[in-house]
Amino acid sequence: MAVPKRRTSKMKKRLRRSGQRWRAQKLNVCSECGSAAPSHIACPSCGYYKGRQVITVDEL
């Protein structure tokens, strides 16, 4: 069975895992109401997605 000859250093381990870091979600501007909405999700304030209304949102 293959066994590593040397221990992986802290630097090598951290460099390898640097791509797994948390990143903030990027928000797009809604074309209908102009509010910030996550991509590929219907706008939570107006209910539009790709130029058409997909959910009805009750105004408070």
Image (cartoon, grey):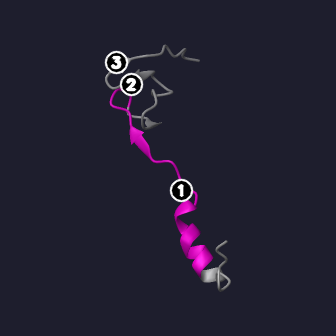
Q: Are marks 3 and 2 in contact (CB under 8 Å)?
A: yes
* Span highlighted in magenta in the image: 12-33
Name the one closer to the observer, 13 or 52: 13
**In the image, which disc is placed on residue 52?**
3
Sequence-first tag of 1 and 2: 1
**What residue is drawn where x is 61% and y is 75%?**
13
Is 56 left, or right, of 14 in this rendering? left
The location of residue 36, given as percent across then percent down, is 45, 38
- Disc sitting over residue 23 in the figure: 1
How many labels, in total? 3
Q: Amino acid at mark 3?
A: Arg
Q: Residue at x 43, y 35 (%)?
A: 35
Q: For the residues marked 3 and 2, what is the alpha-carbon distance in whole angstroms?
A: 6 Å
For mark 2, what is the residue?
49
Residue 7 horizontal/vertical position (percent)? 68, 83
Going by the numbered disc 2, the residue's amino acid type is Tyr
Is the residue marked by circle 2 packed among few (<14), some (14-19), or many (20+) residues within 10 Å? some
> Spatial distance from mark 3 to mark 1, Cα to Cα?
30 Å
Name the residue furthest bottom. Answer: 6
> Residue 13 vs residue 41: left or right?
right
